[in-house]
Every structure is written in structure tokens, then in C-alpha cells.
Amino acid sequence: MNVGICDDEKYIHQEIGRLLESFFHTYNITYQIYSFFSESEILNSSQELDLLILDIEMDKGNGIQVKNFFEHSHKRTAILFLTNYIDYMPKAFGANVYGFLI
């Protein structure tokens, strides 16, 4: 399973990565974690992802724009938003959005 984390905070990558590693080891799932720190990094990546854990509000970009790009590109990546901005939730829903962690 290929998992991307897109957030502008390094500590978020570390914490989410630690949780994912624990989960994947517990269930004996082969995985690879990819880190992206901005909207442009994820949009310019050719990496195919099964799951993207995505921040909505970043210093350099917006997770909703990333979600929209994935939808319009017909990418099947499942998206899980990680955010403190619940006001964005109605705009963030979409075909590939499976949930929100607040």
C-alpha cells in the first residue's frame, strides 16, 4: 500500500508516520510512506498513491485544490483530511474523500 502524507508541518509527518507504521506492522501489510510538504509537491509527483492523508490549510497551498485535482484527473486515491478547520468540511467532500480527522 502506498500512502502519502501532505502537510506543511514536519511533526505531523512524524506522528502520522509512526501511527501508520504501527498499524501496518500489526496487520502485516506491505507499505511505503511518501511525504509531501506543499500542494505543489503532491501535484507535481508522479507517485501513485492508494491513500493520501491531506491537510486542508497549508502555508503553500490548499488541500481542497489537491482534492479537486485528484477528482478531475480521475485518480482513485482515497483521501483522508487531517485538519483543524471544520469550516472547510462542506467544500472538502468529494468522490475520493473518505473522512476527516480533526
Image (spheres, rainbow, N blue to C red):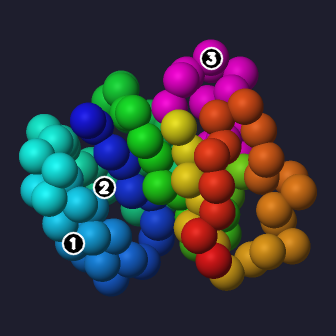
Please name the amino acid that badge 3 sits on. His
Closer-to-camera residue (92/26): 26
Q: Secondary structure at mark 3?
A: loop
* Residue topped by disc 2: 35
Which secondary structure, mark 2?
strand
Q: Is residue 100 left or right of residue 75?
A: right
In the picture of the structure, the residue carrying the numbered disc 3 is 74
Left or right position of 65 against 27: right
Residue at (47, 55) in percent of width and height: 53
Numbered mark located on residue 37 in the image? none
Quadrant occupied by the N terminus = top left
Looking at the picture, how far across and down is residue 61, in whole percent?
A: 63, 59
As shown in the figure, which amino acid type bears the numbered disc 2?
Ser
- Numbered range of the magenta stretch: 65-77
The numbered mark, 3 or 2, whose residue comes first in the sequence reads 2
* Residues marked 3 and 1 touching at CB (< 8 Å): no
- Is 3 situated left or right of 22 in this image? right
* View extreme (front): residue: 27
Task: Compare marks 1 and 2 and give the one earlier in the sequence.
Answer: 1
Residue density around tag 1, few if under 14, some if 14–19, many if 20 or more, within 10 Å: few
Quarter of the view holding residue 50:
top left
The residue lying at 53 percent from left, 23 percent from top is: 76
In which quadrant of the rendered view does residue 15 lie? bottom left
Q: Position of residue 43 (x, y in %)?
A: 51, 37
The local secondary structure at tag 1 comes to: helix
Q: Which residue is mark 1?
A: 18
Q: Is residue 11 above or below residue 2?
A: below
How far apart are the two marked residues, 3 and 2, measured between alpha carbons?
22 Å
Q: Rounded to the nearest whole Å, what is the CA distance between mark 1 and mark 2?
A: 13 Å
Name the mark nearer the viewer: 3 or 2.
Answer: 3
